[in-house]
């Protein structure tokens, strides 16, 4: 008896690569191998966002063009954006980065505030035909609307936007796939609340699903982070004409296997990026040290100065863990600041009670806070570090019991009042309750985009007198 082979589609997917360029050549080689294995049936290749990360020299120096080139060389069929693309690049930067992209960027919940329309380089949905199979693609990204509006974009409710796209696409396609840069908890909710989605390929929360989660008629998959895995899904057409997931999982990427074309392209991009980042910012006649064992050091102080100067606030507070080393003397370049302050962290202004400032400063004297490891929220450092200050001075006794070590605090020479509100320059990471969590209680928040901390440092290093100011002591020990 002759067995009729079922119509099949193989889907490969990546997410949250975060410019780990050491992996992309190996990812491409794995994809090439998989394509050869299924050469008799169609294959679809998709990325679910956060491919770009400005911590990378290649991404920073090329303003995302290196990522676009890698996506093209790997032959993706469609991608969506993550918050790293949408919030760490200006709209103009992204438009330039995607101008040479050979596959569509699909995202249905981002609009331009001015026009109410999507950016010109973005599609609300796509229908891709592979063999005899029509595949509908919808993309969505995390709706950080408060931040997106500062860039001139509106992030609308993803579920509402997806519903609209399902209504348009479902009658036209055999398979409907959602590229979701929303995180696994939200993906579960969408699978529960919405009918018509066959497959959700997820990212944002870096979840690695060794097998799909099935909720109703929807399957959910995710391939971890940093290009360590490539997700694979196999769908087959049933006797009733519908497609079902028959296999899903994640393939480990072997770093020893390389695609020569991409390896060569990366070498070119790295060389070009390093040249771009050699631009001189200033020249210093002495080093600015970062001493993690001390409560303060000059490099941390100048970072706090840069915040206060930029935000024009009463006081500035920022964690020294944003800095990865000391600033040497001599020629200071853009690339040097990028290397030492790599996090895409933005400044913000808020009002904070004196009691919460005092509490935060007490925490900064505790080793469990200084050595606390932080993951996500734009942070690309290792540990939280202590609080660097500008506009305030602290007298403390480290031999006293925790949360009673501070003897006095003054703000611009006036004793801190616990019940008074102060205008504070700080960073967006703290407003999510990460690190020194009392800062998240601040009110009247104003977020400032697109500047990063390293941009503020660049400005401050060029201010006359800044190098002298950063040696003034803020934390005075009585012991």
Image: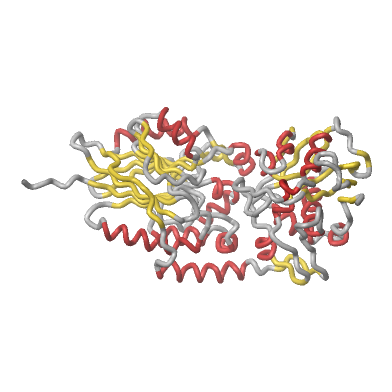
How many labels, in total?
A: 0
Please state if 47 lies on the left or on the right of 371 as rendered. Answer: left
In-front residue for pair 281/435: 435
Q: Quadrant of residue 195?
A: top left
Q: Is residue 121 visible?
A: no
Expressed as whole percent of the image width and height from the top left, the position of residue 90 reads: 60, 50
Expressed as whole percent of the image width and height from the top left, the position of residue 35 reads: 30, 58
* Residue positioned 45% across, 31% down in the render: 189
Expressed as whole percent of the image width and height from the top left, the position of residue 405 reads: 85, 43
In-front residue for pair 362/207: 362
* Residue positioned 73% across, 65% down in the render: 281
Please state if 103 lies on the left or on the right of 343 as rendered. Answer: left
Please state if 105 lies on the left or on the right of 420 as rendered. Answer: left
Q: Compared to 351, does 55 lie above or below?
A: below
Please state if 129 lies on the left or on the right of 471 as rendered. Answer: left
* Residue positioned 71% across, 68% down in the render: 280
Expressed as whole percent of the image width and height from the top left, the position of residue 253 reads: 41, 59
Q: Is residue 387 visible?
A: yes
């Amino acid at each position: 008896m002759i067995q009729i082979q079922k119509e099949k589609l193989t889907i490969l997917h990546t997410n949250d690569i975060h410019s780990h360029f050491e992996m992309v050549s190996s990812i491409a080689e794995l994809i090439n191998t998989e394509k050869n294995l299924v050469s008799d049936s169609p294959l679809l290749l998709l990325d679910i966002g956060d491919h770009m990360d400005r911590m990378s020299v290649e991404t920073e120096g090329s303003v995302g063009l290196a990522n676009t080139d890698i996506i093209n060389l790997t032959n993706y069929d469609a991608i969506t954006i993550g918050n790293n693309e949408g919030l760490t690049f200006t709209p103009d930067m992204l438009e330039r980065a995607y101008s040479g992209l050979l596959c569509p960027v699909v995202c249905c919940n981002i609009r331009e505030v001015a026009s109410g329309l999507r950016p010109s380089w973005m599609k609300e949905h796509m229908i891709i035909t592979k063999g005899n199979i029509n595949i509908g693609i919808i993309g969505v990204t995390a709706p950080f609307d408060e931040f997106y509006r500062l860039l001139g974009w509106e992030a609308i409710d993803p579920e509402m936007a997806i519903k609209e796209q399902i209504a348009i696409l479902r009658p036209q396609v055999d398979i409907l796939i959602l590229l979701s840069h929303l995180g696994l908890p939200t993906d579960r909710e969408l699978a529960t609340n919405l009918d018509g989605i066959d497959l959700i390929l997820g990212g944002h929360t870096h979840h690695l699903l060794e097998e799909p989660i099935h909720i109703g008629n929807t399957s959910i998959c995710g391939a971890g982070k940093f290009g360590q895995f490539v997700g694979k899904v196999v769908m087959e057409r049933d006797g009733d004409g519908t497609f079902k997931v028959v296999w899903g999982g994640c393939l480990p990427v072997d770093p020893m296997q390389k695609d020569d074309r991409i390896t060569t392209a990366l070498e070119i991009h790295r060389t070009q990026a390093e040249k771009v980042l050699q631009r001189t910012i200033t020249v210093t006649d002495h080093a600015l040290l970062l001493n993690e064992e001390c409560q303060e050091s000059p490099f941390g102080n100048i970072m706090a100065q840069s915040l206060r100067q930029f935000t024009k606030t009463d006081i500035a507070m920022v964690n020294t863990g944003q800095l990865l080393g000391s600033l040497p003397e001599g020629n200071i370049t853009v690339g040097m600041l990028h290397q030492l302050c790599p996090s895409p962290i933005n400044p913000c202004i808020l009002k904070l009670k004196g009691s919460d400032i005092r509490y935060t400063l007490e925490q900064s004297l505790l080793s469990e806070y200084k050595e606390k490891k932080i993951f996500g929220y734009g942070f690309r450092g290792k540990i939280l570090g202590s609080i660097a200050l500008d506009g305030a001075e602290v007298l403390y006794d480290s031999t006293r019991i925790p949360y009673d070590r501070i003897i006095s605090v003054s703000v611009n020479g006036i004793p801190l009042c616990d019940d008074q509100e102060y205008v504070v320059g700080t960073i967006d990471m703290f407003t999510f309750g990460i690190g020194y969590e009392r800062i998240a209680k601040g009110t009247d928040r104003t977020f400032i985009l697109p500047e990063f901390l390293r941009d503020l440092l660049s400005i401050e290093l060029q201010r006359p007198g800044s190098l002298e100011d950063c040696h003034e002591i803020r934390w005075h020990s009585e012991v």
